[in-house]
Image (cartoon, grey):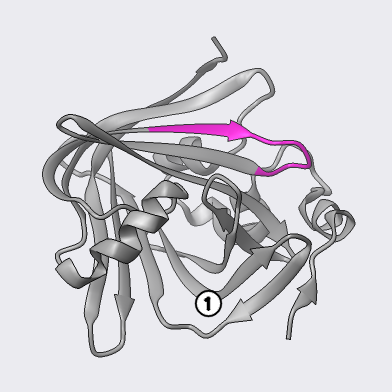
Amino acid sequence: MAEQDTAGSDAAACSPSHPRESVYQRVLGADYASLDPRLQRYFGPIPAGRVGSGSGVYGVAGSRHRFLRPVLAVMAWRHVLFPELGHDVPFRVTNTPTTGGGLGAVRTFEFGSRTRIMQDAMIVRHGVLYDRLGKRGGLGVAIRLSVVSGALHMTSTGLALHVGRARIPLPPFATMRLREHVEDADTTRQHVDVRIEAPILGELFRYTGSFTYAVTPTS
């Protein structure tokens, strides 16, 4: 059954009681202090008039399943995923605070002559981190957060399709898992490993690699 997804309910969900806190801080609560201090720079708040910018190289990015390419090509048009599979892929990310205390992100992957973009916007919805994927936010993902040995772990717990003001829950046909930590060999870089997995089929999509990050004034 579709749920009504009104602007008012989302605004109330993402209006922080402490405006200086990021969406991650508001969901993790006291557990945020257990996060590696160097990661707190990435997952912490971004002041108004500034953006967070990161760049690096992903050892692998994409899907090894050829039969998924038509579906992934459509998702690439919506800035969700992409059909390419590459190694040593140059990568950039730009994080921007949004109105109401949310966080927008644009991730760019360079595959030779083709550039692919993944775009999303995170809010806090009913106390849970909620990610609207794509340039129109058509796919919503509820995410559970945890801190393990200083690293941040994310696991998707629910999917929904957003059509106009309606929110339509979807069956959990795939699960996203993320682990982000600071590299021991080079503490100036942070490492991320994102996997989308499904029963029987296993890993559907993955990107993993490292990058440097800084918060700078908006140009």
Query: Which residue shows up at 76% across the image and 68% down it?
Result: 166
Q: Quadrant of residue 165?
A: bottom right
Name the amino acid type tagged 1: Thr
Q: Name the residue furthest top.
A: 219
Query: Which residue shows up at 46% across the image and 37% down it?
Result: 106
Query: Is 195 placed above or below 186 here?
Result: below
The image position of residue 189, as x and y in percent, is 27, 35
Tell me, yes or no, whether the highlighted magenta stretch contains residue 106: no
The image position of residue 81, as x and y in percent, is 36, 54
Quadrant including the C terminus: top right
Left or right of residue 218: residue 177: left
The reply to whether residue 186 is in sight is yes
The image position of residue 64, as x and y in percent, is 14, 64
- Dot 1 corresponds to which residue? 157
The reply to whether residue 126 is in sight is no
Image: magenta residue range: 93-102
Q: Quadrant of residue 188?
A: top left
Query: Is 158 placed above or below 88 here?
Result: below
Q: Name the residue furthest left.
A: 87
Tell me if mark 1 has few (under 14), some (14-19) or many (20+) residues whose alpha carbon lies within 10 angstroms of its own. some
The image position of residue 32, as x and y in percent, is 56, 54
Is residue 72 or residue 142 the one in the foreground?
72
Query: Which residue shows up at 18% across the image and 29% down it?
Result: 113
Tell me, yes or no, whether the highlighted magenta stretch contains residue 95: yes
Query: Is 98 placed above or below 3 here?
Result: above
Quadrant including the N terminus: bottom right
Secondary structure found at label 1:
strand
